Amino acid sequence: MKGKAPIAEAAKQGLGVAGVAGIPISHPAKIWFPAERITKVQVAQYYAAVAPRMLPWLNHRLLTVERCPDGITAGCFFEKNFVKGLPAGVPTCSVPAESTGKTVHYVVGGAKETLLALVNLGSVAIHIMNCETGSLDRPDWLAFDLDPSSGEFRDAAAAAGVLRKLLEELRLRSFPKTTGGRGLHVLVPLRRGPDQEQVLLVAHNLSQEIARRSPVTITVQALIQEWIQFIRRPKARRHAIFLSDYDMLLTERLVQGVDVWINTPRRPWEASGTSGMKVLVNGGLNLSELDGWWAEAYTPEVGWALGDSKEHGEDPAWDTAEAEALYERLEREVIPEFYSRDEQGVPAAWVAGMRESMARLTPHSSGVLVPLEADRILWQR
């Protein structure tokens, strides 16, 4: 009966609530997956059902969750710092962030009550660290994300075969997981001992060897190698990510709630720049290199620009100058304008820029423009 007390208390307060394994689930009928009409309480019931198999993997591990409080199509975000909002008794662990030194309050997995409490807060996906709370710098597993550029599952399977043979030569066991977007994840259990930096170096070297053995199946481009080296740096390790399966659904989530979209390619590598276009209708402003569509669309009333519209190749001095210009613009123009509020707490200048951007650029950069331009150029002759 003790486990039902929170449910009774929520009902007493007049809240819409349902109980799952003794844990109150608020707004149980809210639709979380519109296409399948799956509700919040059904997601909670699913997690309760799989908990016996899932919890051993979460035990003593710091959790990061993807929260979608109003459903997966209404805006989602990642959260790891739970300062408030958790029910009493949910265990947390305070860890100083390497980049800022600020304390991050992670939830610690292992209990069904904790799992369902996170679901009640809107958590759809739950991610774990590759280490336990008592040894955060000593990972006990390594994962490879095999996501072929072809999008073909057979290519991911072929790559997994190459990786498995290589790991067997090193006397390492591996297990394929179908948790990737289009490909495979390969999980490699480790004896706790090497630190995170050493394990990252091993992963990097293994990736290079796979590419050498099967260049057709897996292509490790120079740019990706540079990114791996960058991500290995302690200050960047937990802050730089690759976005796989970059499709319309991911883009929809990515641009929701974005105030400033920053895009800093070297000219002329902007390509189409459609992500910057997508943020327009959401009220976001662009701060980007004068290349591609932004070189045509930019005026001071609708955002901020970087560069001089010229190509400078791989000149490191120019890269440094542009980086300094970006920080200068953020510190002296963008951030002050965002936080400059009137008596009602409204950033008037910022809102004016949003309105001008939406009114002027959204019609110019929408998908309707392409067929209209095609009609004008190709047929109206």
Image: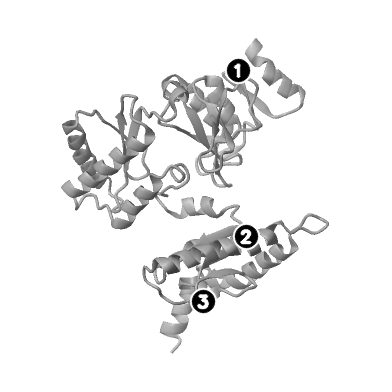
Observer-nearest of 88 and 40: 88
**Closer to the camera in the image, 126 or 5:** 126
Find disc 3 in the rendering and name its residue: 296
Q: Earlier in the sequence, mark 3 or mark 2?
A: 3
At 20% from the left edge and 39% from the top edge, which residue is drawn?
161
Q: Nearer the viewer, mark 3 or mark 2?
A: 2
In this figure, which residue is indicated by the disc labeled 1? 22
Q: CA distance from mark 1 to mark 2?
A: 50 Å
Looking at the picture, which amino acid does disc 1 mark?
Gly
Q: Position of residue 224 (x, y in %)?
A: 33, 53
Q: Residue at x 22, y 48 (%)?
A: 211
Q: Quadrant of the C terminus?
A: bottom left
Mark 3 residue element: helix
Label 3 crowd (10 A; few <14 / some 14-19 / many >=20): few
Q: Secondary structure at mark 1?
A: loop
Q: In this rendering, does residue 272 appear at all? A: no
> Horizontal and vertical percent for residue 372?
49, 77
Circle 2 sits in a helix, a strand or a loop, which is it?
Answer: helix
Residue at the bottom extreme, as displayed = 381
Q: How many tags in the picture? A: 3
In contact (CB < 8 Å): disc 3 and disc 1: no
88 up-or-down from 334: above or below? above
Q: Residues within 10 Å of mark 1 (few under 14, many from 20)?
A: some
Residue of label 2: 331
Front position among marks 1 and 2: 2
Q: Is residue 160 left or right of residue 117?
A: left
